[in-house]
Amino acid sequence: MGLTLVMALDGSECPGEGRFSDASTCGGFIECIADKTGGYSVKRDHCNGYVYNATSMTCSQTLCDSRRERSVTNDYHPLSQVCESQPDRFLCANCKTLVHCVMGQAFVRQCIKDFYCTEKPGFGGAVCYPDEPAAWKCVEATDEYLGYPFAHCDIPDDLCPETDPCLQNPCYSGVACTFTSVAPFYTCGACPAGFTGDGETCDALQCPVGFAGIGGDCAPDSDLDGFPDTELGCSSKYCRKDNCDNCPLTPNSKQEDADSDGRGDVCDNCPAMSNPSQRDIDGDQIGDDCDDDIDNDGSLNAADNCPLMANSNQADADGDGLGDVCDNCPLNPNPGQEDVDEDLLGDACDDNVDLDGDGVEDSADNCPSVANSNQQDVDGDGDGDLCDLDSDNDGVNDPSDNCFLLPNPGQEDANGDGRGDACSTDFDGDRITDANDNCIKNPNVYATDFRY
């Protein structure tokens, strides 16, 4: 069942490109494939004892005279299942395997290097053809290929998947997943109405300033409280009509407001003390105006040397009664916190030397030679990110780090887009997706808040 390759010197054996009878032997045929010189390469093969039908370009069910006693069931091949639906045809079992179907039995040929099994009309079906497919691709399983869920074409480093990736639900909820023939072997459909994204990740459309709602379903919001003036059809609580309720999200039919600050008692974080802003630095649901430990660091306000900034260790290096985290000169005693030039650096340690001109004086600058007014230091090592060779301290230097603000020593990047898996949807690791983050490269800032 071998396959012999013979080059035609003058092309006289080939009337054109295709599969033709070989008059020199019963059941023989030649496959003429055009080459780059204008001639043809010739593959000689045979129908395993059966006559080749040049009209249908198939191996017929007629035995050659010399093979009258041959039975096609003697050498039954496992791939004969491929021939069940088309018992007398040339078919592909996969990218590299050509099957001659004769009376339902498979006679298998493996395509040589740089040749791939493909369908060609001029050959009456499949043929081993050079340089096809031009780019390798995987073939989805069919009933005939139950033992071969996916086939691959000489890909040593990136083999096709063993299972359909859509089974892992890689797309956004409700978005259709379709198997494809090239990596990553699936595509996601469009995001639902009112959402934007690539189908794998979908984010609700935001309403413009002065409007409220969600997912693109918006209406005017006259008081800018996040609730629309009219009822919307979307299901979110932010689609409900604003009725000037002093607790719009909590039932309070009597609208009690003991401290008359405009917030109903049931939703007021200081119900007995007026605090219209409802400011709550530590987020403990107790407003700062009535919270005896505003920063929730374990030290009561009266004894806390930084009552508005958490510092459980109460460190005070210069002994001036102000904790280091809120002292504008942590190494120079200055209990009055004088700051004539209002540059947030106390006069006691303000030498007005700022070599990088970023507004932070060198004595307090974590990057004195590189301008970084926000003083961002992701790994907290005392070196600002802009002058820290490894900002996230994961052992991979920033120029080579595919997530330089989020530790990922393994540098995993499943989709090969250059952004590591660890930060694929949240670049700065602040747990706010990039689509909703106003500062995707600063984990300390994600929104602009004009309330205070």
Image: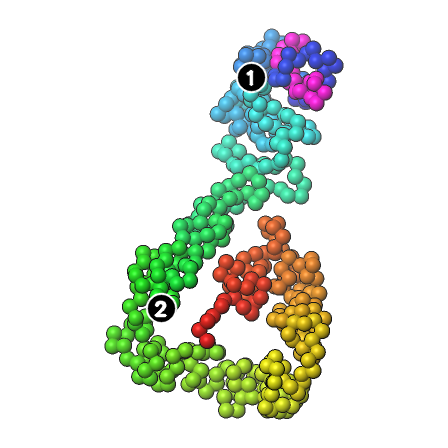
Task: Tell me, yes or no, whether the two marked residues, 1 and 2, touch with CB atoms within 8 Å.
Answer: no
Query: Where is mark 2, residue-wise?
Result: 223
- Residue for badge 1: 58
State left or right for residue 161 relative to residue 400: left
- Closer to the camera, 48 or 370? 370
Looking at the rendering, the stretch of residues picked out in magenta corresponds to 20-42
Q: Residue at x 63, y 71 (%)?
A: 373
Q: Percent from the top left, x then y, of residue 447?
A: 50, 67
Identity of the amino acid at label 2? Asp
Farthest residue to the left: give it: 254
Against 117, is 238 above or below? below
Whether residue 377 is visible here, answered yes or no, is no
State which quarter of the image contains the N terminus.
top right
* Residue 26 magenta-highlighted: yes
Residue at 63% from the left image edge and 10% from the top image edge:
26
Secondary structure of residue under mark 1: strand
- Which mark sits nearer the N-terminus, 1 or 2? 1
73 vs 255: above or below: above
Residue ranking furthest to the front: 341
Judged from the image, the secondary structure of the residue bearing numbered disc 2 is: loop
